[in-house]
Amino acid sequence: MFQAADAMRSVAEMADTLVDDYDVVELLTGVADRCVNVLGVSAAGVMLTSPGGSLGLVASSSETMRLLELFELQAQEGPCLDAFRTGERVEHEDLQAESGRWPLFSAAALSEGFQSVSALPLRFRDVTLGALNLFSVTQAPMAEADVMVARAFADLATLSIVQHRASAEGQRVNEQLSAALTSRLIIEQAKGVLAERAAIDLAEAFSRLRAYARDGNLRLTDVAQATVAGTLDLDPLTWARVVRW
């Protein structure tokens, strides 16, 4: 169960980031990280819908989580998809249950050590923009107080997507969602470039890119674009020791 002071601090920090020039992918990655650090879940991830209506992965708390959520999208079954399709919370699901809702997804999650999962939709009024996945290596359900904090994280994540929308609300939201999904693709490319250059794994490459962006007060997407374009000096990142948030 979360510590109340930590939860309040995390919600306040997230609210403070909702400024004019925030990076949506970085903010949503922070949401996933905070779910792990504050709520005690083992992994978390965020998916968003594209203008065409399909889900795409935008943020995850670990490389294992990223690959599992990509599998969920490929298999077209799992908690995030159900939360998005119904617009309702997917409550605690024991992945070991014989009559599981998602046989392919459950088998993949169990193989990575996860035992249970839940998911929350990212809803703005009557529109569902995506979903937040929460995984645990235990079968114990989340306490209701933890669920409330997770709901607050999900709501703030939703606000981050639609903030400052223009009067043409639908077009503005679609633009932001599309930009977030495109940014994630660029970041994945940058991870690969740095991982190959520094001979490190993808998780470490992502940590170094995030640290570089934060230390330089830069947007993560801009750092990733420069990495892919070859205009960023990668030497400091090939030996950097990163403090993980």
Image (cartoon, rainbow, N blue to C red):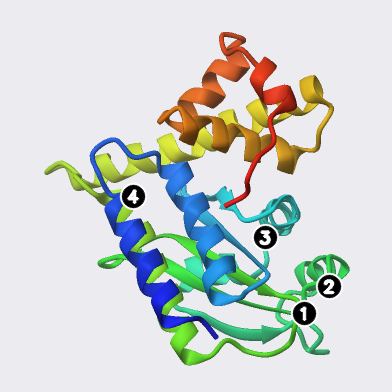
The residue at which mark 3 appears reads as: 76
Vertical comparison of 165 with 1: above or below: above
In primary-sequence order, the first of circles 4 and 1 is 1
User: Foreground mark, 3 or 4?
Assistant: 4
Q: Are marks 3 and 2 in contact (CB under 8 Å)?
A: no
The residue at which mark 4 appears reads as: 161
Of the numbered discs in the image, which one, if any, rests on residue 115?
1
Label 2 Cα neighbours within 10 Å, binned few <14 / some 14-19 / many ≥20: some
- Residue located at (41% from left, 81% from top): 4
Q: Are marks 2 and 1 in contact (CB under 8 Å)?
A: yes
The residue at which mark 2 appears reads as: 110
Vertical comparison of 20 with 85: above or below: above
- Local SS, label 3: loop
Mark 3 and mark 4: Cα distance apart in space: 24 Å
Mark 4 and mark 1: Cα distance apart in space: 31 Å
Q: Amino acid at mark 1?
A: Gln
Image side of residue 212 versus residue 188, left or right: left
Image side of residue 108 versus residue 180, left or right: right
Camera-side residue: 33 or 28?
A: 33
User: Foreground mark, 1 or 3?
Assistant: 1
Vertical comparison of 211 with 59: above or below: above
In primary-sequence order, the first of circles 2 and 4 is 2
- Residue located at (77% from left, 29% from top): 195
Q: Amino acid at mark 2?
A: Leu
- Local SS, label 2: helix
Q: Amino acid at mark 4?
A: Ile
- Residue located at (34% from left, 42% from top): 174
Vertical comparison of 230 with 88: above or below: above
User: Foreground mark, 3 or 2?
Assistant: 2
Label 1 Cα neighbours within 10 Å, binned few <14 / some 14-19 / many ≥20: many
